[in-house]
Amino acid sequence: MGYKVAVVGATGNVGREMLQTLDEREFPVDDVVALASSRSVGSEVSFGDDEVLKVRDLERFDFSGFDVALFSPGAKVSAKYAPGAARAGCIVIDNTSHFRMDPDVPLVVPEVNPDALAGYGRKNIIANPNCSTIQMVMALKPLHEAFGIQRVVVSTYQSVSGAGKGGMDELFNQTRAVYVNDPIEKKEFTKQMAFNVIPHIDVFMDDGSTKEEWKMVAETKKILDPSIKVTATCVRVPVFIGHAEAVNIECDRPVSVEEARAVLRDAPGVVVIDHRVDEGYVTPAEAAGDDQVYVSRVREDPTVENGLNLWVVSDNLRKGAALNAVQIAEALHEGYLEAA
């Protein structure tokens, strides 16, 4: 016997990945429904190789009797519909930013802070962290336990899929326009995305940071340790899938490259590929479609005491979103829920 599961935002990039991941990982499902806005009602999405789901109207859907809902419809939609689903007795795992900093909502990466799940019942909502935060804390957690991290300086190189299907379409259309000398049209991004990099993700805040940069700071503190100092620069790059991060760490205790590699190799969900030769590192192109967080370019930073540099890469639609949400559902199944 299994669970009744709803996937909200099922026609988007992450929603489709959620359905695929539920099937691939054989999550115990008796019934699964695909929900989206009224304009998508009647369209079809795949659940596994053999099952096609007709998309139903989120606005009219009754969550009573459903066990788990995976939400990825955008923050405003989650804010409107997730609390109602939770009140109906359905546990909401929300991939948007809306609930992440709510003190009564656990913000969870199962390999990093699974104990936080114990508080899910306060609102019946669990938040999925930001994609760039997830892959970074996956690498930071084992190093923090072993060497005590004081400060993190991170620069991200984030793919356009983080902006949804519209972002991917815009990169494709702009790239084609460059080659055929058509005008460049901008809708999703503030500047030309094709053959360019843009140091601007989400809105600007009063201190000059973008909200994406703020998310990395605040979420890392909530998930890992409020005493860690974090500063981030988040950059959109013309890559379709996969985020990369250059991470500089200052630790409490001395750490060698060999020790760091050994600790990271033992961390669940982390793969170390670090050879100081051509192609001895992982890029977003190789990480796309994989579930792991890859760490490469491990080296000491001689400019600070106990300093370390890392290159961290992951598929932002998989571990950065859909996979992490499904892993939260799996952790609930293993430790908190009973299938019907």
Image (spheres, rainbow, N blue to C red):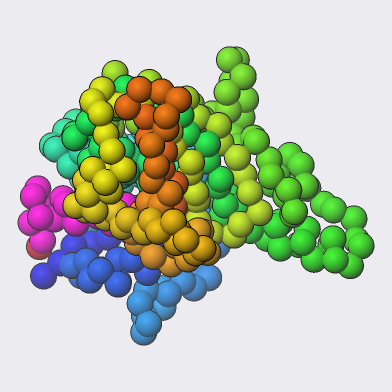
Placement of 94 over or under 149, stated as above or below: below
Looking at the picture, tell me which residue is in the foreground, 338 or 160. Answer: 160
Asked whether the viewer can see residue 264, the reply is: no
The image shows residue 120 at horizontal and vertical percentages of 19, 37
The main secondary structure of the magenta stretch is helix
Q: Position of residue 6 (x, y in %)?
A: 32, 58
Q: Decide whether residue 102 is among the magenta residues.
A: no
Q: Quadrant of the N terminus?
A: bottom left
Q: How many marks?
A: 0
Judge from the rendering whether residue 146 lies leftward or rightward of residue 168; answer left or right: left
Which of 206/307 is in front? 307
Viewer-proximal residue among 192 and 71: 192
In the displayed structure image, the side of residue 126 where residue 94 appears, left or right: right
Counting from the top left corner in percent of width and height, residue 49 is at 37, 82
Q: Quarter holding the C terminus?
A: bottom left
Q: Is residue 322 magenta?
A: yes
Q: Of all residues shown, which one is farthest toward the bottom?
A: 50
Taking the image as drawn, is residue 248 in sight? yes
| Residue lying at 10% horizontally and 55% vertically, measured from the top left | 334
Q: Which residues are magenta?
A: 321-339
Q: Residue furthest top?
A: 207
For residue 281, which quarter of the picture?
bottom left
The residue at the point 8 percent across, 50 percent down is 335
- Residue shown at the point (60%, 52%) measured from the top left: 160
Say which residue appears at 41% left-offset and 23% top-offset: 304
